[in-house]
Amino acid sequence: MPMTIRPVTRRSFLQMTAAGAGALMASRLWADVRPLTDANRFALFSDTHINADPLTISRRCNMADQLNTAVRQVLALDATPAAVLINGDCAHQTGEAGDYVQLLKLTAPLSNGGLPVCCALGNHDQRDRFWQADRTNGDRAGSQRLAEDRQMLLIKSPHANWIVLDTLDVPRAVPGRVGEAQLRLLERTLDDPRHASTPTLIMMHHNPEPTADPAATQPAKGVIGVLDTKPLFDVLLRRKHVKAVFFGHTHKWERSAIEGMHLVNLPAIGYPFAETQPTGWIDFRIAEKGAKGTLVCIDPKFPKAGETIDLAWR
């Protein structure tokens, strides 16, 4: 259920175009950008885990300080990204109203500086409270609301489209799900002649879980990701213009591929699960035939800081 926080220094950063009856709306983020904005550059955040109390510490990390650092790093870039995408688990544990108020405060320097911020949901988020923050401070523009309050968002940039999925299934339950309605909308969007020849990047909070049984009433032990990964990948792999899937949830920086489709596990900003994993975000630049992602660590001295991945499109 993406929420887009509009920049406050421009009259409007979006031009909305309908993608057809029953389909989602498209956000043209490059249509009204300020000077020195790179329309093919995106800052990819995940797992911010912000608590209403900015002094809260988890796993020896102060999540508010971590996000503050990431925001400053984005604002210090030589060219402004087209948008910041926060890939779920925006809130710390149970998605309290105050968590989202604090998140909006911490990301205000981005929106005040003219940067759109798109927030998706993870298993630690709560839909109703998230919607309240949306109604008060954000914007649903660009999203199509689906059954069970799910939404998906299409973001168009010069070299590729982003589709942000909503994989929150049951709040506080670890696994996620795309859901039948969203899956059908995803198919229609990918097959739309206006999008079918454009490289497409999928973003979702939960990690793929190819061994999960989508029909199971209870997930198997150890299954933490997208329960309906099999039908999702059936849709994605057959459409060669889908080039990569980005996800968080595991607090891990990792890259793999399946049938030439890249799988990129985004690091957490809030805190790592393992000391060998970084906290940080990805400075992601899209080109005509591929993309490059650079790991920006909260701690610039972390051994993996500056590590890059080069993604060639299949």
Image (cartoon, helix red, strand yellow):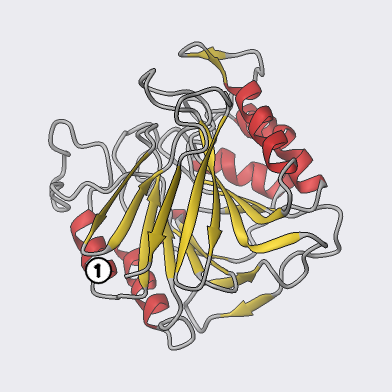
Q: Position of residue 236 (x, y in %)?
A: 29, 67
Name the foreground residue: 202 vs 73: 73
The residue identified by callout 1 is 237
Amino acid type indicated by mark 1: Leu
Confirm whether residue 277 shows in the render: yes
Q: Position of residue 251 (x, y in %)?
A: 39, 31
Determine whether, in the image, residue 98 is placed left or right of residue 96: right
Give the vertical position of 173 relative to 276 (above or below). below
Confirm whether residue 179 shows in the render: no
Give the vertical position of 287 relative to 250 (above or below). below
Name the foreground residue: 68 vs 103: 68
Residue depicted at x 64% and y 23%: 64
Residue depicted at x 47% and y 61%: 291
Q: How many marks?
A: 1
Determine whether, in the image, residue 233 is placed left or right of residue 192: left
Name the foreground residue: 18 vs 148: 18
Residue depicted at x 26% and y 36%: 224
Q: Position of residue 249 (x, y in %)?
A: 38, 37
Q: Position of residue 310 (x, y in %)?
A: 42, 55
Task: Classify mark 1: residues with Cα within 10 Å, few (<14), some (14-19) or many (20+).
Answer: some
Residue 298 occupies quadrant: top right
Give the vertical position of 184 relative to 269 (above or below). below
Residue depicted at x 32% and y 66%: 183
Determine whether, in the image, residue 308 is placed left or right of residue 218: right
